[in-house]
Amino acid sequence: MLTGKQKRFLRAKAHHLNPIFQVGKGGVNENMIKQIGEALEARELIKVSILQNCDEDKDMVAEAFVKGTKSELVQIIGNIIVLYKESKENKQIQLP
């Protein structure tokens, strides 16, 4: 689990990132979870945006990603979910 200090650090790092995935009408599916898992392995910290036509609640979407990718939820701000997962091969972020 991330501490408050680590979450603040990651939020600051995520601030300049652009969302690389969008959740739309189809909601969350296995393929999307797999792709997000791969993106987390490559980048460690990503943003996912939830489009207005998404039928699922953003908390449910975030939970599905966290469970499916075994990542940490950094924050949900508006319709943006910020996820973090320490990379096995490609570690770039040193947490405080």
Image (tube, rainbow, N blue to C red):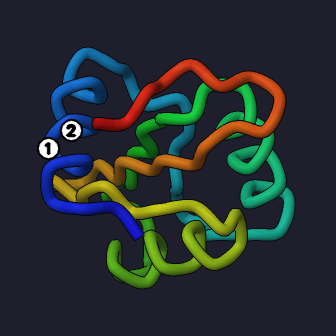
Residue bearing the label numbered 1 = 8
Residue bearing the label numbered 2 = 11
Helix, strand or loop at mark 2: helix
Residue at left 29%, top 49%? 80
Label 2 environment density (alpha carbons within 10 Å; few <14, some 14–19, many ≥20): some
Quadrant assignment for the C terminus: top left
Is there a contact, CB below 8 Å, between mark 2 and mark 1?
yes
Residue at left 55%, top 64%? 25
Residue 65 x %, y %: 59, 67
Give the vertical position of 15 relative to 64 (above or below). Answer: above
Give the vertical position of 63 relative to 51 (above or below). Answer: below
Helix, strand or loop at mark 1: helix
Question: Quadrant of residue 3 in the image?
Answer: bottom left
Give the vertical position of 84 relative to 65 (above or below). Answer: above
Residue at left 74%, top 22%? 90
Q: How far apart, in angstroms, are the residues tagged by discs 2 and 1?
A: 5 Å
Residue 64, disc: none
